[in-house]
Image: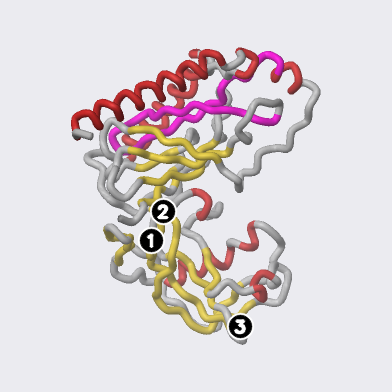
Amino acid sequence: MPRRRIVIVAAAITALTVAAGVGAYAWWPESKRYGYPPPHKTAVLDEQARQVLAEWDRSHPGQPVRRYVPVGSDVPNNRRGWTFVLPPDAEFEQAGGRRLTATIPLSETAPAPSTVVWQDGAAGVPLVSAAEAFTAAQQEPCQREPCDGPPMRVTGAEMGAVPARTANGWASVPAWVFTVEGAAFRIARIAVDAEPRPYRESFSGAEHAWVVQGMLPATVDDALTVDYAGAPPGVGPCSGEYTAHVVEGVSAVVVVVEPMVPPEWVREEARNVSCAPLSPFGPYRQTTVYLSRPLGERVLLDLDGDPLMVTRQRP
């Protein structure tokens, strides 16, 4: 068959397939159709997105550049960085309520700036002293529970690096590594000197699904796929469907994911059904939005204005 005829036949098949899909939706029973969110609720979410983008742009003026931006799930409620155990060890988990104590003098002089390294780039960062990192590591567990057990004795400190989650994916981040007397593990504290983001109440405006992280394909930098905490797909009182769009700023973007309006019979049935709450730890649903320009060094934010991790697939 000539090539031209093959192309024409393929185009005809594609057109028929699209038409069939549209026709199937048109004939889909109205009782199973979801409606789009009310415009006034979308407007509330978009206004919140614009506010957090404006705040981020004010704090990160100029052309976006690669920088170390820790993501929320790894940042504890204290002034500096976070703490790791190397390697993860059950013995340390069982040592809850034990304060660290130093048996050696720790330097109070900050070392020279160092570098955070990603697979696709790097950024210079200032560092804190060993004494400051130790104080932060010492206080962290005692913020969650009383530290009344026998102390763990730190006998050494050296500069190292740990893998950590950032707004640009996993990175190797400078850390102070402390040796614990008689233990097979060591305790590492991120050594980057960075001021924490101010705490604020979670956004509680119009209903929305919480976006938890993003992903970019290896070759296309404007197709952003996000994971979000949503109800299982389907038509029923404990199921749901969602629609998503992106609000863009100079230095960051926000993906807004909204629940679609279920059919009337589902809303009626939901009044008499108790559904399990959505877990913040998944399983997650996914959706893809298309940016007006490549994401580049811009950061993905949630509706609280907190940065989220975006990973890039390898070629």
What residue is drawn where x is 55% and y is 54%? 76
Q: Compare residues 129 and 77 and report the one nearer the observer.
A: 77
Say which quarter of the image contains residue 186.
bottom right
The residue pinned by badge 2 equals 166
Q: Compare residues 30 and 135 and report the one nearer the observer.
A: 30
Asked whether the residues under the numbered discs 2 and 3 touch, taking CB atoms below 8 Å apart as contact, a structural biologist would say no
Q: Where is residue 35 in the image (x, y as percent from the top left)?
A: 55, 16
Q: Which kind of residue does numbered mark 2 sit on?
A: Thr
Q: Where is residue 9 in the image (x, y as percent from the top left)?
A: 29, 27
Q: Which kind of residue does numbered mark 3 sit on?
A: Ala
Secondary element at image label 1: strand
Asked whether the residues under the numbered discs 2 and 1 touch, taking CB atoms below 8 Å apart as contact, a structural biologist would say yes
245 left or right of 113 in image: right
Q: Where is residue 99 in the image (x, y as percent from the top left)?
A: 64, 71
Q: How far apart are marks 3 and 1 (CA)?
A: 27 Å
The residue pinned by badge 3 equals 183
Bounds of the magenta span? Answer: 238-265
Secondary element at image label 2: strand
208 left or right of 116 in image: right
